Amino acid sequence: MIANHKKPGTVVERPDENNEQGFTLLETSIALIVMMVVTLATGSLFVYAVNYNSGSGDRSAALAIAQQRIERLRRTPYDDDLLSTASATETVVNSGRSYTVVTTVCWDSSCGGSDTLKVITISVTPVSANQWANAPATVTTQRTAPSVGLYAGVSAL
């Protein structure tokens, strides 16, 4: 200890300068390892988020393709060749990504159709290795043959 005399009769003790306190090398290394583990966990979370967002974009595009196809088939005349083919498969490229489009038209009782009713199903699957987008987006609609008939409650003249 070194004595410091400020006022006569009082002695202020100062700590010895060789006994300074601080972090040891072991404490610093442990803190660095903890920060590294937290950083790696956050990095894997970002990879998960990027994959999930990419798969979500694929599913949205697949649903948009399916809706466009359904609208096109709803505008097609009932007796057109497009509505007379039982099933068709094709590959579509949208925004640089490939999608498999399966169009199924059913007009018999096995699927709920009949002579005057066709059940149209469009199934679009992204061709991707992304596990989030492997399930197909499926849209189904019914199409009936145009006919002239009576309105409910109106009698024929």
Image (cartoon, grey):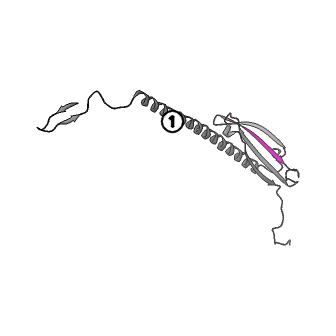
| Magenta part, dominant SS | strand
Q: In this view, does 132 lie to the left or right of 38?
A: right
Residue drawn at x 63%, y 42% is 56
Q: How crowded is mark 1: few (under 14 residues within 10 Å), some or many (20 or more)?
A: few
12 relative to 25, above or below: below
| Residue 24: image location, x then y, percent | 39, 29
Direction left: furthest residue: 8
The quarter of the displayed image where residue 49 is located: top right
| Residue 118: image location, x then y, percent | 83, 51
Residue drawn at x 65%, y 40% is 58
| Residue 143: image location, x then y, percent | 80, 53
Q: Which amino acid does label 1 sit on?
A: Val
**Front-lying residue, 103 or 34:** 34
Direction front: furthest residue: 9
The quarter of the displayed image where residue 66 is located: top right
155 relative to 108, above or below: below
The quarter of the displayed image where residue 148 is located: bottom right
Q: In this view, does 34 lie to the left or right of 60?
A: left
Which quadrant of the rendered structure holds the C terminus? bottom right
Helix, strand or loop under label 1: helix
> Mark 1 highlights which residue?
38
Q: Give the range drawn in magenta.
A: 98-112
